[in-house]
Image (tube, helix red, strand yellow):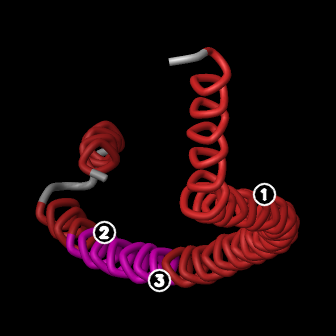
Amino acid sequence: MSINLTLFAQALAFAGLIWIIATKIWPPMMNAIEERQKKIAEGLAAADYSQKALAQAREAADAELRAARAKANEIIEQAHQRANQIVDQAKQEALVEAARQKALAEAEIAAAANRAREDLRRQVSVLAVSGAEKLLKREIDANAHKALLDELAAEI
């Protein structure tokens, strides 16, 4: 064989290979590459959209958090005010109860003092009567009277 024929056969085989690649392999490969590029572009767009949505969601969450903190602080302040009101009310009720208890105690003390005075008067009158009886039964003597009065004073 001659070199020209071999060269021509090789050129023809190469041209056939190029034609097969250009018609059968290249279009599906280009379609696959284009689809891949589309998917990558869509993925990048979706990622960009997701980042924007995430930033918006973070801003919204921060706003909600600030609102919730403000509401919580308001509720805590109201709770403190209510607690102070309850404590003040309890103090007032305790003062009223203390005054009532004091009045009852003073009334009991006054009643007990009156009973003690009445008992003391009764005892003094009994002692006076018994002392007078003793004086009348004895003869009248200044020293005896003084001794009886001293004894009576000691009993009182």
Name the one closer to the observer, 47 or 152: 47
Left or right of 90 on screen, residue 144: left
Most foreground residue, 134 or 67: 67
Crowd tier of the residue under label 2, counting other residues whose Cα lies within 10 Å: few below 14, some 14–19, many 20 or above: some
Residue under label 2, please give it.
Answer: 124
When asked about the image quadrant of residue 94, the answer is bottom right
Image: 108 above or below 28: below
Determine which residue is flagged by label 3: 104
Give the residue displayed 44% in from the left and 73% down from the top: 109
Look at 27% across and 75% down and name the residue there. Answer: 119
Camera-side residue of 153 and 93? 93
Secondary structure at badge 2 equals helix
Q: Quadrant of residue 2?
A: top right
Q: Which residue is mark 1?
A: 44
Q: Are there few (<14), some (14-19), or many (20+) residues within 10 Å of tag 1?
A: few
Range shown magenta: 104-126
Measured Cα–Cα span from mark 2 to mark 3: 30 Å
Which amino acid does the dot numbered 2 rest on? Val
- Who's the residue at 76% across and 72% down the image? 68
Q: Is residue 4 magenta?
A: no
Q: Nearer the viewer, mark 2 or mark 1?
A: 1
Sooner in the amino-acid sequence: mark 1 or mark 3: 1
Amino acid type, label 3: Leu
Percent position of residue 82, x then y:
71, 78
Q: CA distance from mark 2 to mark 1?
A: 116 Å
Percent x, y for residue 31?
66, 66
**Earlier along the polypeptide chain: callout 2 or callout 1?**
1
Mark 3: few/some/many CA within 10 Å (<14, 14-19, 20+)? few
